[in-house]
Image (cartoon, rainbow, N blue to C red):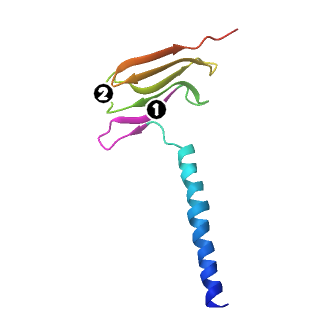
Amino acid sequence: MGAKQTKWNLFLLLFCLVFILIPVFSTAQLIHKKVNRYDENGKRTGLWVNYWDEEEKIPMSKNHFKDDIHYYWHGKWKFYDQDRKLIRKTIFKDGVLIEENFINQAE
């Protein structure tokens, strides 16, 4: 194999790493985002999910924490009934309710 062919193979390898493998792994990390995390000070941070049934993973609420201050609400929160239907969406900023939407469930 000549030097020209070796350089071409190296180029193809680097191309695959940069433009194919790295985006795939980055996307996988976004899909499998960690939930219910604590920061270095032991305070709740980021996305938290509370469940009606922990074993079956039936969500009750999905929300975001910042600094784990008691009753401190921040970001988008979603609330579900026991049948996994979205019933309410809210948006908080620094503990203040900015927007609240109740979802009408047709029976």
Residues at marks 1 and 2 touching, judged by CB atoms closer than 8 Å = no
Query: Secondary structure under badge 1?
Result: strand
Identity, as a three-letter code, of the amino acid under mark 1: Trp
| Residue that mark 1 sits on | 48
Give the percent coordinates (x, y) of residue 25.
57, 55
| Residue that mark 2 sits on | 69
Name above or below for residue 39 compared with residue 87.
below
In front here: 64 or 13?
Answer: 13
Q: Earlier in the sequence, mark 1 or mark 2?
A: 1
Q: Which class describes the residues within 10 Å of circle 2: few (<14), some (14-19), or many (20+)?
A: few
Cα separation between marks 1 and 2? 14 Å
Give the percent coordinates (x, y) of residue 50.
49, 27
Q: Is residue 7 magenta?
A: no
Q: What residue is drawn where x is 57% and y is 49%?
A: 27
Give the percent coordinates (x, y) of residue 20.
61, 61
Q: What residue is drawn where x is 31% and y is 24%?
A: 70
Name above or below for residue 70 compared with residue 19.
above
Identity, as a three-letter code, of the amino acid under mark 2: Ile
Query: Secondary structure under badge 2?
Result: loop
Give the percent coordinates (x, y) of residue 67.
31, 33
Q: What residue is drawn where x is 59% and y is 68%?
A: 15
Stretch in magenta: 37-50
Residue 106, located in which quarter of the rendered image?
Answer: top right
Name above or below for residue 43 compared with residue 3.
above
Residue farthest to the front, as pictured: 4
Which quadrant would the N terminus be assigned to in this image? Answer: bottom right
Give the number of marks. Answer: 2
Q: Is any part of residue 16 visible from this angle?
A: yes
Q: Is residue 16 left or right of residue 42?
A: right
Q: Is any part of residue 52 visible from this angle?
A: no
Which quadrant would the C terminus be assigned to in this image? Answer: top right
Q: Which class describes the residues within 10 Å of circle 1: few (<14), some (14-19), or many (20+)?
A: some
